[in-house]
Image: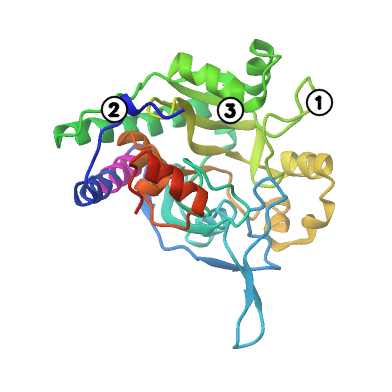
């Protein structure tokens, strides 16, 4: 629901300056909080590498062959797996990590106020120890990310934009606890209720089936450990909804990979290079995630449509709705 009374009109040039400011300041804050350095990352991966992020497992990938040798390439859907390979290849030490600008095409994503077929995010990954594979370590990392977001929000206010308040206090809850709290609601309705109540929420343990026989949300079985992952949500007042800013988690080790692959019935993946490297202990233990760049700008600037902070494709219905509400898309 669009709360027009909460919406602050911005001209395009002013908005573009704020977008640049947010991206620069948050990128620096995130790198400082998590001990990350920026690296370059691919836009495409080969089909047979096993590096493609399968997301929920049903999305169609954007693929093409190249003239040089006919090799089939796929535009990345995220860099969840590639980053772990990069940490090993570049010999990152324990406690340090990388981040990169990730641009992806997700052709099956719905197009609405908060979703686009074009995805831009900061993908990050950090080397951890076996002892770090805990809920407490996950929570500590989430708090650091939220701290970086709140610092960026405060800096934005110092530049003159004072329309949005972000809570630095994170409410943590597991997906099963959330289901127990709201047993008669859908997963998205549960997210809305808990986020409207607590403003900044991290829902943990997403991917495995809950007591109702369904997962809170679908997750690929081969990058996040479903017992050590989650989604970071903020209450977005202008749209009166929960806005997901990040999906993240401690990555699978050998045991959790085998368990989740068996649950998913995806045993054929174990023959791929990425999966073999995990089973053979050739990749470091890591934590990582993606943080939506346009989503973060949308949150901190109180925008009513993601197209206000991102140039992408919008269908005629979306364009008409925005025109009626006097919402200007890029």
Classify mark 1: residues with Cα within 10 Å, few (<14), some (14-19) or many (20+): few
Q: Which residue is mark 3?
A: 134
Looking at the image, how many numbered discs can be counted on the residues? 3
The residue furthest bottom is: 68
Q: Which residue is mark 1?
A: 213
- What are the residue bounds of the magenta stretch? 23-32
Q: Residue at x 66, y 42 (%)?
A: 252
Q: CA distance from mark 2 to mark 1?
A: 38 Å
Q: CA distance from mark 2 to mark 3?
A: 33 Å
Q: Is residue 172 visible?
A: no
Q: Nearer the viewer, mark 1 or mark 3?
A: 1
Mark 3, secondary structure of its residue: loop
Q: Which residue is mark 2?
A: 164
Above or below: residue 41 compared with residue 203:
below
In this view of the protein, which residue sits in the foreground, 12 or 53?
A: 12
* Position in image of residue 69 (x %, y %): 64, 87
* Position in image of residue 23 (x %, y %): 30, 47
């Amino acid at each position: 629901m669009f709360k027009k009374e909460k919406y602050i009109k911005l001209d395009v040039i002013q908005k573009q300056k704020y977008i640049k400011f947010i991206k620069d300041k948050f990128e620096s804050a995130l790198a400082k909080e998590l001990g990350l350095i920026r690296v370059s990352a691919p836009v495409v991966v080969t089909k047979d590498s096993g590096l493609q992020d399968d997301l929920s497992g049903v999305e169609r990938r954007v693929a093409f062959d190249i003239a040089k040798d006919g090799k089939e390439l796929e535009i990345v859907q995220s860099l969840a797996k590639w980053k772990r390979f990069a940490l090993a290849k570049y010999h990152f030490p324990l406690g340090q990590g990388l981040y990169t600008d990730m641009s992806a095409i997700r052709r099956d994503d719905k197009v609405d106020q908060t979703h686009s077929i074009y995805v831009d995010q900061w993908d990050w990954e950090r080397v951890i120890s076996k002892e770090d594979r805990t809920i407490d370590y996950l929570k500590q990392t989430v708090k650091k990310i939220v701290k970086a977001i709140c610092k960026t929000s405060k800096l934005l206010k110092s530049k003159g934009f004072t329309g949005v308040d972000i809570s630095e206090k994170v409410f943590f809850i597991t997906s099963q606890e959330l289901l127990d709290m709201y047993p008669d609601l859908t997963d998205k309705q549960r997210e809305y209720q808990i986020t409207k109540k607590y403003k900044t929420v991290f829902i943990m343990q997403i991917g495995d089936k809950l007591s109702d026989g369904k997962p809170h949300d679908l997750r690929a079985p081969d990058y996040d450990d479903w017992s050590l992952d989650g989604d970071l949500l903020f209450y977005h007042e202008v749209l009166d909804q929960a806005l997901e800013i990040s999906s993240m988690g401690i990555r699978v080790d050998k045991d959790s990979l085998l368990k989740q692959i068996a649950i998913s019935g995806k045993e054929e993946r174990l023959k791929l290079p990425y999966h073999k490297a995990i089973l053979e202990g050739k990749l470091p233990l890591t934590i990582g995630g993606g943080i939506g760049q346009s989503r973060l700008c949308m949150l901190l600037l109180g925008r009513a449509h993601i197209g206000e902070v991102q140039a992408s494709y919008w269908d005629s219905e979306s364009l008409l709705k925005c025109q009626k509400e006097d919402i200007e898309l890029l």
